[in-house]
Image: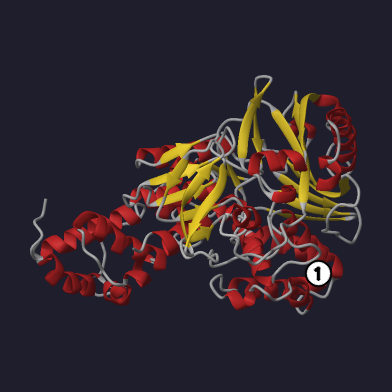
Amino acid sequence: MYDTIIIGAGMSGLAAGIRLAYYDQRVCILERHTTIGGLNSFYRMRGRDYDVGLHALTNITPKGTKKGPLARLLRQLRISWDELDISAQLGSDIVFPGVRLRFDNDLDLLRAEVAREFPAQQDNFEQLINAVVDYDDLDESHQAISARERIAEIITEPLLIEMFFCPLMFYGSAREHDMDWGQFSIMFRSILMEGLGRPYAGVRLILKLLVRKFRGLGGELKLRSGVERLMVEEGRVTGVVLESGEVLHGRRVLSSAGWPATMRMCDDGAPVISRSSGNLSFCETIATLDVQPKQLEHDRAITFFNDSADFAWENSKSPCDVRSGVICSPNNFAYDEPLAEGTMRITSLANFDYWKNLDEQEYQLEKLRWYDRITESAVQFVPDYRNRVIDTDMFTPTTVVRFTGHDNGAIYGSPEKQFDGRTHLENLFICGTDQGFVGIIGSIVSGISMANQHCLRD
Amino acid sequence: MTTGEIREEILDILEVIAPDEDLSNIDDAVNFRDQMELDSMDFLDIVMELRKRHRIQIPEDDYVQLASMNSTVTFLEPLMKDIQKV
């Protein structure tokens, strides 16, 4: 009998597992996939290491900072700042036709950039910062306000509004066209006010650190252990049945499988709140270069781009929406030593249904076709690196499903979140993407806070 | 445990919770929240550490007693007087 069974060995499940195992619970994490990480994972192909998910960690505050999500999660997981081995970004930018806003981990750069490109908006920008800082994460009533309505009261230049939405939506909006004001505020602080960083070894460093901690505390991790169903008796979950037929009993279950998937696992037949799974998914191209991007005069960690004055955040009508995207170069962080090879990754919105319905041969061809189109669009905004490419890979919405099990390959899950993590069963809780926080730091905080609120105090 | 030993034990717990914190200048009369910026998650950790180490159960209504070093030690004295320091 386990004290807590956790479904999913992604960031949130591992973080929750560490909290519970630290306080002497018997904990088992069940992962359907052959590897850990979920949306944020890693693999090796043709002798090269690749990251999935991670572009950069958000919320990067300097060592010794006591406030904010990063400081909080380090304390809660008993991890020292140095163990994460984070290097700050060299700088990033948001680029629309004719306008470029640079930013880094010091808000003064973005202030100066806004003043240069939009002099009339300087005071409004300060007002926006104050409004965002005043937002209280724990006050859920703020969540439901439309960010578009709120920001239009403060910023009067539509182009600047679109330029703020572009990075914040790409890094964390499950909703089409708009964001909740709460989510907007959290993302604005995480990305534009605190900043971006990356461990030299990428996401594998973070995942290996979390697994080592979890196992060191006596936690059990089972890979290739998909949950077939949750056993329910009289309003309580009593355990899980694995796809192999094995049965595990637990006093409670914490699921990071997503709200709809978790509800489908319950075998009680009770009517549950149905909820959209979300439909925003991504394709990502990955190019390995024979030079460092800096030698091509590209020194940005992240470039968010959009090819017109209007930024569309919606389920892609074509296989990939190449009008906008995120260009990430993991080389452009302040490491002590450069990474071995240059890498350029480009993320764009993609249509899950299109990619899902291709047969294997078409799928391979379409990957090649859209790799080229995405890259062609991106090189309008960064130096053309196409003649320096020595290896490529690409993931699509169907790859996301394989790694995460989340419906529709929805990167940020359902547009409606379950902030308190509760379900119709008194000892079944959810954490991760559909609970409310996104991104690596957000997922870890989600796992920690759901473990604290629901799994520790009895 | 004596009053002094309880204080040492709390310092030890704070060091585990906030390893980057300098605890040598802690003012026993001032709220932890104000001098160390501890949040509600950290207070839960103080409670959980006491439970893990000494099997002491502190009901949620009593968390307010853990505001400062002085109030914490006063609150814990009757609960910890029979515990042997190891």
Q: Is residue A192 above or below residue A35?
A: below
The x, y position of residue A426, in whole percent, is 47, 65
- Judge whether A338 appears above or below A439 on screen: above
**Which image quarter is the C terminus of chain A in?**
bottom left
Residue drawn at x 44%, y 58% is: A451
Residue tagged 1: A119
Task: Residue A19 in the image: state x and y as whole percent.
Answer: 40, 52
Q: Which is more toward the observer, B1 or A9?
A: A9
Q: Quadrant of residue A329?
A: top right
Question: From the viewer's perspective, is A118 left or right of A30?
Answer: right
Q: Residues within 10 Å of mark 1 (few under 14, many from 20)?
A: few
Q: Is residue A143 left or right of residue A366?
A: left
What's the chain of the residue with tag 1? A
Residue A25 picture location, percent across and down? 34, 50
Instruction: Give A126 or A430, whichever is nearer the viewer.
Output: A430
Residue extending farthest to the top is A47
Residue that appears at 55% across and 44% down: A227
Decide which of A22, A164 is in the foreground and name it.
A22
Q: Position of residue A456 (x, y in %)?
A: 37, 60
Instruction: Give the amino acid type for the residue marked by disc 1 in the picture.
Output: Pro
Q: Is residue A438 visible?
A: no
Residue A454 seen anywhere in this rendered image of the structure: yes
- Residue at image x 90%, y 60%? A309
